[in-house]
Image (cartoon, helix red, strand yellow):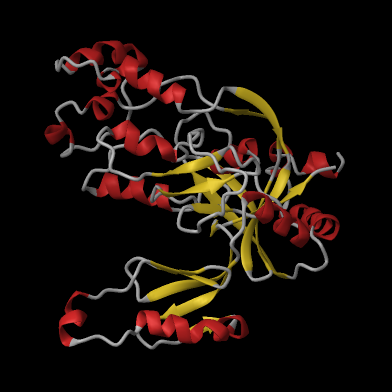
Amino acid sequence: MDLFEQIEWANWKNLKDTEKEALLHQLLMYFVPPTIEINSMELVNFELYGIKCRTFELELDGELFVFIPGNKETILGWDLGAEGLRPHELLGFDAAHFAKNTFKTTLTNEAIDSVAQWNEKESTDELTSLEGISAYINKHTTDLRKVKIPAMIVQKYALPAGTEFLGIFDTVTGTFEGEIEQYVPYEKEICETFFPRLSAAESLSWSFPKTMLIKNKVYLEFLPESDYYFVYSHSDWTHDELKHALKREGFDLLSEDQWEYVVGGGTRRLFRWGNELLLQENESGRQIKNKMDGANMFGLMIPTEKNRFELTDDRTIVKLMKQSKDKTHLIEKMLPLSSYFRSSNTVSLNQKLDPNDYLYRKVIKVEG
């Protein structure tokens, strides 16, 4: 087998660790520009919903990446509607009763048709029946297709659009840890924002902002349930400007096909973590939430907050969702987290990318 055949997932998973390491060294030599510093590499096991992948986590220029094997015959997209999902969750049937229980299996396909009769409320809303919900799911997911996906070195965490990570700001001590030379020019503005002079009355209602943006200078984002902000440099770019900047560094953006593959692994499930949608306040609900928020089968962290879109290499196609208002139906709330969901949002040609609205993820594609 040649190099490209060995880094196909079907072959990669059968290789010994020493063989994988030798292959990775070849890939780093030929596909990673010499200007990018390789700080570390480690073999790591990832698993989600029974899908296992032993691969490398790398640190490139201080940022975490994961090597993802390719798949020349992966199936992507969705045309199965609500198949595999739990009808009682979708229809809200006897929610008070079901919230007290833990379900370990889904209902059979044969039961789905009869379950539609459980909801007796007469409505023209298309989300009041399984048939309508299925149509909604198919409408908002990509078409079923077979595609060839190359092996890739993919950034573990998506970044706010137009930014590069610099370090962490501590609101308790007012200190910064990271790329200090790039931080110092903005230190005064940052401290004035986070430690303003307030009257006694003003101090009672003041709170730290969730984000801080000084265009073409710096962007800060608060880490929930902490005393810290992530600090980034910022460039006020359009989609094309971002792509060109990444190209100069030796990176790219994922295509829609590649994004769906690295997020869901090409599995025939609507959601990467399984079929559960209703997060109950019990141990089962906590386990589902941990699967959603944890690393996927390739080791990537996929945002679940539904507060930003993630960019692809096509400005007219973005993934995930920024929900501007609360949705009422469970499938409306959860479908944006599907591996195959496609948002109706697009980025216009001259639109500047607001880091509060968009994320991006760097990738090095291993293509011949």
Q: If the image is split into quadrants, where does the N terminus sit?
A: top right
Q: Residue furthest front?
A: 350
Q: Is residue 25 left or right of residue 283?
A: right
With respect to residue 265, does 177 lie above or below? below
- Position above or below: 216 against 135: below
Question: Horizontally, is 116 left or right of 346 in the view?
Answer: left
Image label count: 0
Q: Residue at x 66, y 44 (%)?
A: 313
Observer able to see residue 82: no
Q: At 68% from the left edge and 28% from the top edge, which residue is drawn?
A: 147
The image quarter containing residue 248 is bottom right
Nearer to us in this view, 87 or 21? 87
Residue 36 in picture, x, y percent from top left: 76, 67
Q: Which residue is at a point 50% across and 59% down the rendered structure image?
A: 355
The answer to which image quadrant residue 66 occupies is bottom right
Q: Residue at x 42, y 21 (%)?
A: 81
Looking at the picture, how far across and down is residue 83, in whole percent? 40, 21
Residue 171 lies left or right of residue 61; in this view the side is: left
Query: Residue 259: percent from the left, percent from the top?
Result: 60, 41
Q: Give above or below for 194 relative to 104.
A: below
Residue 66 seen in render = yes
Residue 52 appears at what percent x and percent y? 56, 44
| Nearer to me, 300 or 12 | 300
Work out whether 259 lies above or below 107.
Answer: below
The foreground one among 138 and 298 is 138
- Screen quadrant of the C terminus: top right
